[in-house]
Image (cartoon, rainbow, N blue to C red):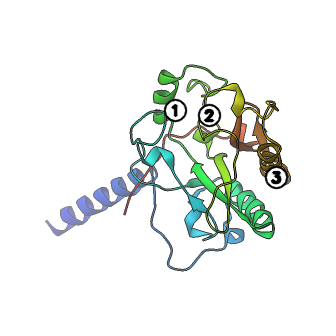
Amino acid sequence: MKLYIKISFLLILTLLLSCKSTQLNSKKSPVLLDIAKETDDNDFVNLKNYSNDFVYDMKYATADNFLKEKVYPCAECFLRVKTVKSLLEANKMFLAKGYKIKLYDCYRPKAIQKKMFQLVPDANYVANPKKGSIHNRGGAVDISIVDFNGIELDMGTKFDFFGKEASHNYLSLSDTVLANRKILKEIMLQNNFKSFDSEWWHYNLNGSNTDKVENLKWNCN
């Protein structure tokens, strides 16, 4: 009987460990971790564990988005290690200029991508889930910048504005808006990101388009 109990316990433990790989751990570290010590650039990690110098306004963890409903269980920013490394370097440059990155969205499960495309079936604004978004690969961020008082710089439109005015190529804007977009874009491009023409807020890590599309979900502890 004792042997049977031990075998049963081992089988249950194995099952739990195999299921663990389908979820992301959102626990915060009491002491910030060093991203340079992470050995696998393709692992998913929580940005909050590596820096306190970001501002978070995770729109899809609220109803304040174009879906008009909360679709994330909680406001966490998961990204691949390599994306976090570049984002930390970019934020250092913003901090030196008196700004810091404000995040609207990070990794996005594929199931959420499907829902977005149903509402806005235009690949100029929402990636087709059949192909997958860079957000689904952990290599994209939707961001703006704020000053040290938390005031966001004027970028001309709100986040997730589906119109020509949100494009980097739209120049009929004030000098202030154009200058703000330029600061954001220049620093991100200097840190291994590339911009997305139709959305001033969206940046992809270079080379992340070949990474695997994921449908991972995170725990809220």
Q: Residue 189 at what x, y percent from top left? A: 83, 48
Q: Which of marks 1 and 3 is nearer the N terminus?
A: 1
Q: What element carries label 1?
A: helix
Query: Disc 3 designates what residue?
Result: 183
What residue is drawn where x is 81% and y is 30%? 169
Horizontal side of residue 189 vs 162, given as left or right:
right
Residue ranking furthest to the left: 1
Foreground label between 1 and 3: 3
- Within 10 angstroms of label 2, few (less than 14), some, or many (20 or more) residues? many
Foreground residue, 8 or 172?
172
Mark 2 near mark 1, Cβ–Cβ under 8 Å?
yes
Mark nearer the viewer, 3 or 2: 3
Q: Which amino acid does label 1 sit on?
A: Gln
Which residue is identified by label 2?
Answer: 133
Q: Residues within 10 Å of mark 3 (few under 14, many from 20)?
A: few
At a point 51% along the width and 35% down the height, the residue shown is 110
Residue depicted at 24% across the width and 66% down the height:
6
Earlier sequence position, callout 2 versus callout 1? 1
Q: Which mark is residue 113?
A: 1
Residue 39: which quarter of the image?
bottom right
Q: Can residue 27 be seen in this view?
A: yes
CA–CA distance in space, label 2 to label 1:
7 Å
Q: Distance between the residues labelled 3 and 2?
A: 25 Å
Cβ atoms at labels 3 and 2 below 8 Å apart: no
Q: In which quarter of the image is residue 95?
A: bottom right
Looking at the picture, which amino acid does disc 3 mark? Ile
Indicate the quadrant containing the N terminus: top left, top right, bottom left or bottom right.
Answer: bottom left
SS at mark 2? loop
Residue at image location 69% in from the left, 33% down from the top: 166
Where residue 151 sits: x, y (%)? Answer: 63, 60
The numbered dot on residue 53 is none
Q: Residue 96 placed where, x, y %?
A: 80, 69
